[in-house]
Amino acid sequence: MSAPAPNRGLVVFSGGSAANNLVDVFHAVRESKHCPLSYIIPISDNGGSSSELIRIFGGPGIGDVRSRLVRLIPDSPPNSERAAIKALFNHRLPADATRAHAEWHSIVDGTSSLWTAITPAKRELIRSFFNLLNLEILKRARPPSSTFDFTSASVGNLFLTGARLFSGSFESAIYLLGSICGVPSDLVRVIPAINSNFSHHISASLANGTIIVGQNSISHPSEPTALQPSRRPSLLLADGAPDPDYLSSTPNPITTPTPTPTPITTPYPDDESHPPGTLPTLRHKNIRFNKSDPEDLPARITRIWYINPYGQEIRPPANPRVLESLHDAQAIIYSIGSLYTSIIPSLILRGVGQAIAMGPARHKILILNGSLDRETGPRGGAFTAVDFVDAIAGAGEESRGVGVGGDGEGGGRLPYSAYVTHVLHLDGPGTPRVDRERLAEMGIETLRLYGRKIVSNEGEEEVALGMRYDSTALVQALEVVLGKKGDAILRGGREGTGLSRRNTLDPGRKRGE
């Protein structure tokens, strides 16, 4: 008798910090479904300590990958070795440059207190990659004009970079960090959206025709956003060749123009990490930025695309492991986080749209953000749930080489439900508006969940900033959609469950009731 086929996996598209709050939710659902779980993480982030590693070494933006790996380290007693390793890889060097440099050297030479609870064998293994990285930093130093800035550097990012330089493989570095930390890779996988040792930057076009270059400038700029003039793009594949299939797939596949790079006249003789002609925007340090209260965008984002160092559009293929996970998925989840810089960069890669739309996954679930951010409003017009779905479906169609948008009517375009079948959402101050009737017309079911207000104290008043999901309610809602349970919950919330409606999802009531 042949062994039963294993359960198909769950695939989660997410970025870093926001979705880290839902890791326990996804873990609970994975356990209830007895299946593997894959996190697809973009590598386009060029902010924070990742920006300095990219500036000196090139390579992918690793911050979100490191953040998820460390978050997945199993819980351990406070004084255990595993807890100490988690603290080490979570640690950031001081914001003062002199103190940061001194603390880095205490880690490299093994005298830092961070090593206290880590056994000699693991300490020396980890230190070997820090030492390699330190040597590479010294080799690239050209003082006083070009030196590595350790300010606020993530120790986990430094380790991943050292491991990548040693092995020549980003995925090998991820495997090593996961192995050292005890992340069960047979059950949970952290997969970079692009398998590359090179930097992959993104640009955004706005509805007013302007362009923003680089993820940090799109999402949380460290300085007022520099907008660039727009012109018709030259579209290249990852190898630099024109993409005739994309250009001929629709009469006008690109409705918003992308930039032609401005010639660079300033020489950079001491910076060897970028080829001559690299856009100045991509060479900035972005170590410090304002993530909590950035300036509003002057208009809505209309499109995201990848660029090479000269600003030309490219269409890189997805990591083969991403496509493999989608081809073996029972469900796809778009997690909370920045829509255009955490989710869309993974969806527009070649192969992803086809794998989502035509793959075996029956359920494609959007967990709607509990608040709006710089990318989704309010100055450009607050995004609704329909806008979120439209952006995701448009990215999937663009991945397939089809024009953005569409209701599946002609032109080879697929319906919205090919990409999103369910929307889970909260209802409260600051949340995106949900038009249940319109979503139903698009073939999408909606489930409203219980959540908690996020408030900020301004003077003597509390200001509501949005809503936060209740973990128990979100687990139940995902299980309802995936079919483990929920008939009783859907019939009323109490029948046969021992739970009150307050603590479960609320699929029946309309906004404002």
Image (tube, grey):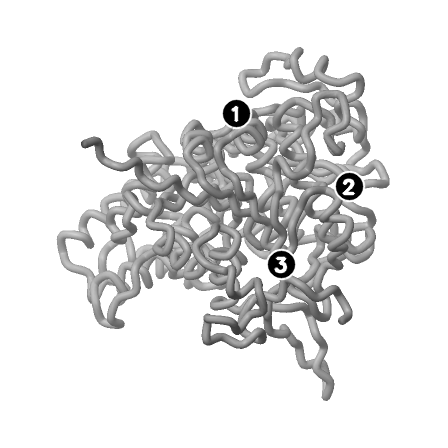
Q: Identify the residue at horizontal 64%, vertical 26% (top origin).
A: 310
Looking at the rendered image, the disc whose residue lies closer to the viewer, 2 or 1, is 1
Asked whether the viewer can see residue 272, the reply is no
Give the Cα separation between the discs numbered 3 and 2. Answer: 39 Å
Number of other residues with Cα within 10 Å of mark 1, as a class: few under 14, some 14 to 19, many 20 or more:
some
Kindly identify the residue that appears in the image at 48 percent across and 50 percent down. Answer: 482
Question: Would you say 513 lies left or right of 246 here?
Answer: right
Q: Position of residue 228 (x, y in %)?
A: 78, 36
Secondary structure under badge 2? Answer: loop
Nearer to us of marks 3 and 2 is 3
Say which amino acid is labelled 2: Leu
Q: Is residue 110 left or right of residue 51?
A: left
Sequence order check, earlier mark of 2 and 1 = 2
Q: Which amino acid type is marked by label 3?
A: Leu
Q: Is residue 350 left or right of residue 170?
A: right
Q: In the rendered view, would you say 501 is above or below 266?
A: below
Front residue (pair 163, 389): 389
